[in-house]
Amino acid sequence: MASWGGAEEQELDSRNQQRSYALAGKVSTLRSLALDIENEAYEHNRLLDGMGNDFSSGEGLLSSSLGRVKGLLTSGRQNRRAMCYMALFVVVFIFMIWYLSSQLFSGQ
């Protein structure tokens, strides 16, 4: 059996050491990347939970507003007149926004 010389053994040991350091660097990079992904996922989950709460509160606001509108529609003549004025105001407001935006963008 052939025995390894001292120079060859030192060369192999040096290569192994270099590869070990390179591997340790890659492992460190992967670990920091995994931690960054974990933090990003945590932040996204927190953001989505907050949005769910916001949508729930918005749903409650819209349902109560819709209940008031239904109450206006089912009540007497005076409230119907107020409802017509409100609808007219909304239509005029939307028309004004459309007109102003068309004037603004046509000037460019």
Image (spheres, rainbow, N blue to C red):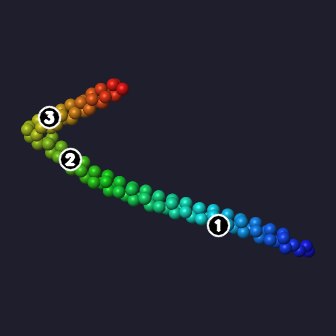
Q: Is residue 39 above or below residue 102?
A: below
- The disc at residue 84 is none
The residue under label 3 is: 85
Q: Quadrant of residue 86?
A: top left
The residue under label 2 is: 65
Q: Is residue 95 above or below residue 17?
A: above
Question: How many angstroms separate mark 2 from mark 3 (CA)?
Answer: 17 Å
Which quarter of the rendered picture does the C terminus lie within?
A: top left
- Say what amino acid the circle numbered 3 marks: Tyr
For the residues carrying marks 1 and 3, which lies nearer the camera in this image?
Answer: 1
For the residues carrying marks 2 and 1, which lies nearer the camera in this image?
Answer: 1
**Residue at 47% across, 61% down:** 39
- Residue at the extreme right of the image, as rendered: 1
Name the N-terminal-most of marks 1 and 3.
1
- The disc at residue 24 is 1
Q: Is residue 91 in sight in this rendering?
A: no
Q: Are marks 2 and 1 in contact (CB under 8 Å)?
A: no
- Say what amino acid the circle numbered 2 marks: Ser
Q: Is residue 103 left or right of residue 36?
A: left
Q: Is residue 18 left or right of residue 37?
A: right
- Say what amino acid the circle numbered 1 marks: Ala
Question: How many angstroms separate mark 2 from mark 1 (CA)?
Answer: 61 Å
Location of residue 60 in the rendering, given as x and y in whole percent from the top left corner: 25, 52
Q: Quadrant of residue 106?
A: top left
